Image (cartoon, helix red, strand yellow):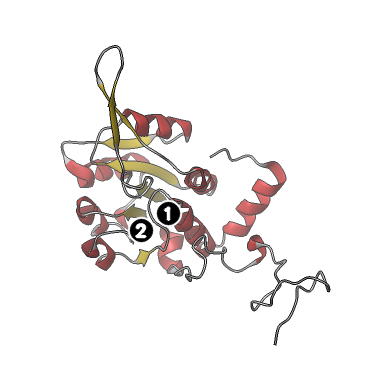
Amino acid sequence: MDRTCCRSPNSSASWTGRCACAKPWRSESPVSMNPGVARPPMDRRLAKSVRFVSLDVDGVLTDGSIWVGADADLGAPRDLRRFHALDGLAIRMMQRAGLVVAFLSGKRSAAVRLRARELDIAEVSLGSRKGKLSALRGMLARRGCTWDQAAHLGDDLTDLAVMERVGLPAAVVGAVPEVRAGAAWVGTVPGGEGAVREFAEVLLVARGEWDRLVTEFREGGRFAG
């Protein structure tokens, strides 16, 4: 039977199982950014143990594209990255929840370092010769965190060593099969299109912090992404 929105008797909105006027922050879980695809839940025990979140860059914070050009005057190579504003706000919300957020990439990039500064990311490793695992080990030691208290969101083979050690290994939907197989959680949103936002929302919901953070944002709008 077709039903209309409870707040507007004359509305033509079709009944979808809940009121069409319902707000995302009133739900038990955020509304999926990928319509028609159910957002996978996250293990609450794992989520609540997280204190440190490391994010791969290419293919996670970006769509994996690398735009390379040259300085018009010096002829020096330049690289550019495209980031999603939804991910920026998600990072701010995780920080607001008391989590340390880090960028962990196998490639050096001035653009990524600039984005890290914009988001007050203090833990950044780009192109470390010792690899991601060694870089993350140092970050965790500086922050007094254990491997079990760390989460990592990745997409490619270079993330495997890290994912095998952290307590909450996660993957974006476009991750290679090996990474997806080793992940405790796999998202539905592609890298560079809000994948970090999806991960952050599910994580914060599982921790029981999402509603509080959304209320703070609604009242003060203090998070710039």
Quadrant, the N terminus: bottom right
- Tell me the SS state at disc 1: helix
- Tell me the SS state at disc 2: loop
Name the residue rendered at 42%, 69% in the picture. 43
Q: Residue 171, position in %: x, y?
A: 33, 59
Q: Residue 87, position in %: x, y?
A: 47, 47
Would you say 131 lies left or right of 173 here? left
- Most foreground residue, 208 or 113: 113
Would you say 203 lies left or right of 66 here? right
Q: Are marks 1 and 2 in contact (CB under 8 Å)?
A: yes
Task: Tell me if mark 2 has few (under 14), some (14-19) or many (20+) residues whose alpha carbon lies within 10 angstroms of its own.
Answer: many
- Most foreground residue, 224 or 15: 15
**Which residue is tagged 2?**
172
Q: Is residue 14 above or below residue 152?
A: below
Name the residue rendered at 16%, 36% in the picture. 129
Name the residue rendered at 32%, 52% in the picture. 146
Q: Amino acid at mark 2?
A: Val
Q: Residue 109, position in %: x, y?
A: 29, 32
Q: Which mark is residue 195?
A: 1
Q: Residue 74, position in %: x, y?
A: 26, 13
Q: Is residue 46 above or below residue 94?
A: below
Name the residue rendered at 35%, 58% in the picture. 172
In terms of sequence position, does the residue under pointer 1 or pointer 2 come before the other? Answer: 2
Q: Amino acid at mark 1?
A: Ala
The alpha-carbon separation of the residues under discs 1 and 2 comes to 6 Å
